[in-house]
Amino acid sequence: MVRFMLGRLLRAFITIIAVVTFAFVVLRMSGDPSQVMLGPDAPQDAVDAFRHRWGLDQPLWVQYFAYVRSILTGDFGVSMRDHASALGLVLQRVPATLQLTLPAMALKLFLGIPAGVYAALNRDSTTDRAVILLSVLGFTIPSFVMGLLLVLIFSVMLGVLPSGGQDTWVHGILPTLTLAIGGIGILARFSRSAMIEVLTQHYVRTASAKGMSWRNVVWRHALPNAALPIVTLVGFMVGSLIAGAVVVESIFSWPGIGRLLIVSVSNRDLAVVQCILLVIAATMVVSNLLVDLAYGWLDPRLAARRH
Amino acid sequence: MSTLGPSFIELSNLRVGFDGIEVLHDITLTIAKGEAVGFVGESGCGKSVTWLAALGLLPGKAQVTGSVRLDGEELRGASHRLLERVRGGRIAIIFQDPSSSLNPVLRVGRQITEAVRLHRSLTVHDAKAEAVRLMDMVGIPDARRRFDLYPHEFSGGQCQRLMIAMALAGQPDYLIADEPTTALDATIQAQILDLLNELRAETGMATIFISHDLGAVAQVCDRVCVMYAGRIVEEGRTADLFDHPRHPYTRGLFDAIPRLNAPRRRLLPIPGMVPSAKDMPSGCAFSPRCPNAVAACLEAPPQLGGLTAGRRLACYQPMPSLSGLGLTETAKLPRYATP
Ligand SMILES: Nc1ncnc2c1ncn2[C@@H]1O[C@H](COP(=O)(O)OP(=O)(O)OP(=O)(O)O)[C@@H](O)[C@H]1O
Ligand SMILES: [Mg+2]
C-alpha cells in the first residue's frame, strides 16, 4: 500500500510538472505580453525595457529554469499589470468560485445519485423513463446554452432571478443551477447503469435468498458495490471544482477563478495564468489521490492487488 | 406420494414464462422433510428456474403460475414477510458459482453472521460465535482468524463451503443445492458432496440436489427427477430409476456417460438438440430425438403418470421395463474417489 501510494504521488508530481511546462511553453510562444500590456504603438525602447524587466529577453530555457526554481521555493511571481502576488490574486478568487461549485456539487450528489438509483430500482417505470430523458437533456445541452436558457426563462420571461453579478446569494442561483444540471444528468445516468449492473449480480440473489428484506439487500449489498464506479466519476467532478466554472462565470459575470483566467490570458499576464493552471492541476491531482484512497477502502480486491 | 412426513414442499402445476414464452410447464411434485431428491437434465431444461420460482427469486419479468406450498402454506404471491422467513429459515439455497455468489466487498464472517441474525434472535456477539462455529463445521480451517477475510481470499471450493455455512445459518429444513460442484475441480467436487452428505446425516435437512452429473446424483440422492425441456419426464427411486430407466431420454442420458468399471464401449450421445422454448413441438418435446417415437408422440405431450410405487413417467413409448442395460445396481455408475 505504501509503495502504491508513493507511485501515485510520483505520478501526481509528474502530472503537475507536465502541466507547468506545457503552460509555460505555450504561453510564451503564443504572443508577447509587451504588445498587450503596452499597446501596439509603444516605442521600441519601452518594449525592450519591459521585456528586460520581466526576463522575456532571455532564452526560453533560461526563463523556464528560473521559473521552476522560483515555484519550488514557493514564489509564484507577480502580475505584470499591478505587481500583485499572482498566488494572492488567484487565492482571492477561489472562494467566489467555490460559492458556485460547492453547492453545484452538492446538488449533483444529492439529486443525481438518488435519481439514478431510484430509476434502476424501478426499471422501465415511468419515473425511470423520465430520469433517462431528463438526464440526457441535462448533459447534452452545453452549459453556455443551458445558462442562456435559464437566463431567458428566469430573468427575462419570469423576471424572478438576476442574470448576473455577485451581490447576494440570489445571484448565485442561476449560475449554480447551470453548473449542476449537466452533472446531475451524468451522475443519474451513470448511477442508474452501475446499479442495474450490480442488481444482476449473483451475490444480490444470494442476499435475497438468505431472507433479507429487499430494502436491506439494496442498502447493504447492492449500493456498496455500485458505489465503486460512482466514486470514480465523483472524483472527476471534485477535481473540476476550481476549473469547472470558466464558461458559467463568464456568462454570469461571476468574479471567480474562471473570469480571472480569461482576463489574464487575454492580457498575457503570464505569472497569473501559470499560477491558475498550477492550482487547477493541483486540485485535480489531489482529487485523483482521494479517489484512489477511497477505492482502496471500498474495494478489498484492489487493496489486495496493491500489496 | 404415499408417505408424507410432517413437513413437505409441494409444487403443483407450477409454470414459468419469460416474455410470454413458457419455459417451465406444469411441474407437480412433493418433497418430504429429510429426503434427498436429485434433478437432472440437460442445460436449459428448467432445473434452476423450478427452484428459483419456488422461492420467488426469479426476476420480476418472469410470469409464475401454479402453486408452491410449504407445509400447506402457499408461498407463491405470499407476503414479503412470509417469504423472508422461509428463505434461508426454512428453505436455503446454494448456487453453481460460489465465488460470484458471495458479496465481494463484504467480509465473509459478516455475510454469515448476517444470515444467522436474520433467522435467529442472537446477540451480535453470539451470532458471530455461531458464524465461526458454522465455518468450522463446513471445514474452513482456522475459521476464527479467517472470519474477517474477503471472498477473493478463499478458493472456489472454500467459497462453496462458506455458502453452505451461510445456508446452514438459518437452520433450514430444506437445502437446495443448484449444481454446487459444477464450477469446482474433481477432488473438490467429491469433498463438497461428502460434506453435503454428512450435513444431511447430522441435521436431517432435506436436500434438493440439482446436477448434470448422474454419478454425483447417485451419491447424494434417494430419489431422482429427470427433466427435459421444462417438464419432469421421469421420476423414481435412485436405484430403481438407474437400473430400469423407462423414458428414452433417461436411457439416453445413461448411455452418454462413460463407465469406469464396465467394458469399453462407444458412448452414445443423444442425437439432435433440445428444441428451443420458442418452437417447442406440439407433441412430446423429446419426440424429434426419440428412437421410439410414433405418430401419437407428435400429437400431444404425454402426461406424467404413476407407473409403479414411487415411479412416474411421461412417455407413450417407454423402454421395456427390464431394459437390458446390464446394470443391476447403482454402484456401477461412476463415483468420485474420496481421498
Ligand atoms: N432470467 C431469465 N430470462 C429469460 N429466460 C430465462 C431466464 N432464466 C432462465 N431462462 C430460461 O429458462 C429455461 C430454463 O433455464 P434454467 O436456468 O432453469 O436451466 P437449467 O436446467 O438450470 O440449466 P443449467 O444446467 O444450464 O443451469 C432456459 O431456456 C432459459 O433460457
Ligand atoms: Mg441451472
Image (tube, grey):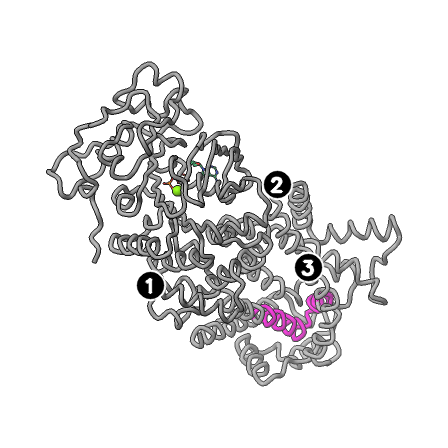
Q: Which residue is mark 3?
A: A110
Chain letter, disc 2 residue = A
Check disc 1 and report its element: helix, strand or loop.
loop
Q: CA distance from mark 3 to mark 2?
A: 22 Å
Instruction: Say whether marks 3 and 1 touch (CB < 8 Å).
Output: no
Which residue shows up at 25% across the image and 52% down it? B186
Ligand 2 image-quadrant field = top left
Q: Which residue is mark 2?
A: A124
Task: Name the chief secondary structure element in magenta.
Answer: helix
Seen in the picture, residue A160 relative to A55 is either above or below; the reply is above
Chain letter, disc 1 residue = B
Q: How would you rate the neighbour count of disc 1 (Cα within 10 Å): few for under 14, some for 14-19, many for 20 or more? A: some
Corner quadrant of residue A306: bottom left
**How many marks overall?**
3
Locate residue B226, reporting x and y percent: 33, 35
Check disc 3 and report its element: helix, strand or loop.
helix
* Magenta residue span: A258-285
Locate residue A208, reporting x and y percent: 52, 51
A241 in the magenta segment: no
Corner quadrant of residue A218: bottom right
Q: Nearer the viewer, mark 3 or mark 1?
A: 1
Furthest residue in direction left, as rendered: B263
Residue type at tag 2: Asp
Residue type at tag 1: Gly
Residue type at tag 3: Phe
Which residue shows up at 66% across the image and 52% down it? A115
Q: Which residue is mark 1?
A: B139
In this rendering, position of residue A20 left or right of residue B290: right
Locate residue B273, reporting x and y percent: 32, 29
